[in-house]
Image (tube, helix red, strand yellow):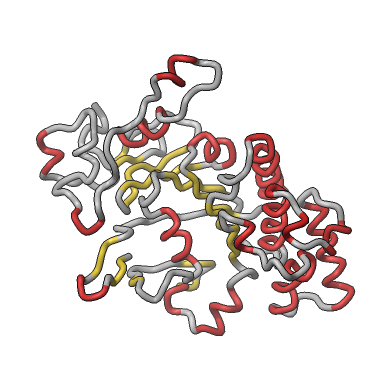
Amino acid sequence: MTYRIGSGGEVPAVRGVSLSLAAGEAVGLAGESGSGKSSVALALLRLLPRTAVVGGQIMLDGEDVLTMKWGRLRAVRWSSASIVFQGAQHGLNPVRRIGDQIAEPLLVHRMASGTAADARVRELLEQVGLPAWRARSYPHELSGGQRQRVMIAMALACAPQLIIADEPTTALDLMVQAQVLTLIRQLIADHGISLLMISHDLSVLADVCDRLAVMYAGRLVELGPSSGSFEHPYSKALAAAFPTVGDPSSRLAPRGLAGDPPDPQKLPDGCSFHPRCPVALDICSTVDVDLRPAGADRTAACVRVGE
């Protein structure tokens, strides 16, 4: 996936990412800001700007999203796959009642109308832990956590097979974040929905997802079960960057990475991570390896895997 930047040509944003989700499976996508996580998510439903050029295939229930006609794509959005954006405040129309906004996908896809749509809205609000009378509220009358629940209700409205959640709890306080994560786990279990959840917080992803995929500089560097230990140096550094509550040493001397991810227009030779890698070898500056076996059901793109 590349972006056209004026006369400067194309800038690689995502490089050779390959992921699969089974029915009812939850996969977490992690990485620093600018690693390409949201670009992957938006590409799944062709929500990227016109300057984006996407290659390969995006298969959804046997159909390639990239080759769908506009009418077919419009039919697939919400009904087969839906998305929960990071900022619910920006994802909701401030001058429309939330009940009308939740009902809109049902009306567009002709899955319900009239009293049936109203009943479905009440049912969805109760599923996400909100009283049915909140359907008459406007977004500004809800808290941040309540608005996020409304976004989840909208995503569930047409009973999709896949939900894409792009940083759904980042703007919430810890107590509300825990409530929303519990809700997401329960909904996946109850409805058998596949989930692609994006976050920079590995602990959040590990709490919800079956597998974790870690991205750096537009490509996957590790993929494996959420319960195992990481093998790629970047994944380990990402996990270690979060301080431990109650541990003064981790709070006063947080472990992280110096520097910033590389500019996509000026990617270094070899492994893109080697300029920041604490265990880089000479070969890392000239050779970039693909994902390779790194333990039980785990792969990592590092020459040191297996040492």
Q: Nearer the viewer, residue 188 or 36?
A: 36
Q: Where 232 sits versus 42, above or below?
A: above
Res. 75 in view: yes
The residue at the point 53 percent across, 40 percent down is 205
In the rendered structure, the answer to whether residue 245 lies left or right of residue 159 reads left
| Picture coordinates of residue 98, whole percent (x, y) | 76, 64
User: Where does residue 227 sit, x and y in percent of width and height?
Assistant: 50, 32
Residue 196 x %, y %: 53, 53
Q: Does 182 sit left or right of 124 as displayed?
A: left
Identify the residue shown where x is 46% and y is 29%: 242
| The C terminus, quarter of image | top left
Can residue 189 be seen in this snapshot? no
Q: How many marks?
A: 0
Residue shown at the point (47%, 73%) measured from the top left: 65
Q: In which quadrant of the rendered view does residue 296 lie?
A: top left
Residue 122 coordinates in the image, percent (x, y): 85, 61
Q: Quadrant of the N terminus?
A: bottom left
Which quadrant would residue 111 be assigned to in this image? bottom right
**Towards the viewer: 297 or 286:** 286
Give residue 91's quadrant in the image: bottom right
Is the residue 115 above or below the residue 84 in the image?
A: below
The residue at 70%/54% (across/down) is 147
